[in-house]
Image (tube, rainbow, N blue to C red):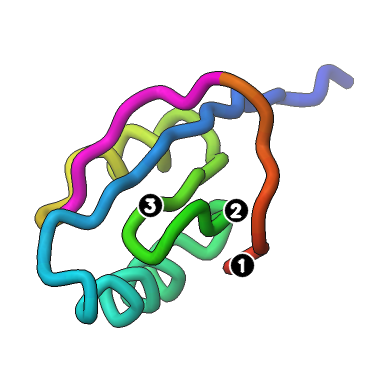
């Protein structure tokens, strides 16, 4: 039996609203995208690793800009 494998993608998500609203906006993403792994880089920037379909949907979220992440991951775990 062949197991299906998902390709994982890591994005940098940056909140484009007021910095004080970033935490609430992150909470909404955490509730909607439970399979994604979020790492906080700053109060408005997060690395997110998810399967390709989820990453694609995350990249289209209002109030967030996204870019494919490169480099090493270090920081606090948000989820």
Distance from disc 2 to disc 3, alpha carbons, whole Å, reads 14 Å
Quadrant in which the C terminus is drawn = bottom right
In this rendering, the answer to whether 1 lies above or below 41 is above
Distance from disc 1 to disc 3, alpha carbons, whole Å, reads 14 Å
Residue 45 appears left or right of 7: left
**Residue wearing tag 2:** 37
Residue drawn at (60%, 53%) of the image: 37
Distance from disc 2 to disc 1, alpha carbons, whole Å, reads 6 Å
User: Please, what secondary structure does the residue beneath circle 3 have?
Assistant: strand
Task: Assess whether mark 1 and mark 2 are in contact (beta carbons under 8 angstroms).
Answer: yes
Q: Looking at this view, is 48 or 8 the one in front?
A: 48
Q: Closer to us: mark 2 or mark 3?
A: 3
Q: Looking at this view, is 50 or 69 the one in front?
A: 69
Q: Which mark is residue 45?
A: 3
Q: Which mark is residue 69?
A: none
Quarter occupied by residue 16: bottom left
Q: Which mark is residue 79?
A: 1
User: Please, what secondary structure does the residue beneath circle 1 have?
Assistant: loop
> x%, y% of residue 72?
67, 28
Majority secondary structure in the magenta region: strand
Residue 22 appears left or right of 11: left
Range drawn in magenta: 64-70
- Ranked by sequence position, the earlier of labels 1 and 3 is 3
- Ranked by sequence position, the earlier of labels 2 and 3 is 2
Quarter occupied by residue 39: bottom right
> x%, y% of residue 74?
69, 45
């Amino acid at each position: 039996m062949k197991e299906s494998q998902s390709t994982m993608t890591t994005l940098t998500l940056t909140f484009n609203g007021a910095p004080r609203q970033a935490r609430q906006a992150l909470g909404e993403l955490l509730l909607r995208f439970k399979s994604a792994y979020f790492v906080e880089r700053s109060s408005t920037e997060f690395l997110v690793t998810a399967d390709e379909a989820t990453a694609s949907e995350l990249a289209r979220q209002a109030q967030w800009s996204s870019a494919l992440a490169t480099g090493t991951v270090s920081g606090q775990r948000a989820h």
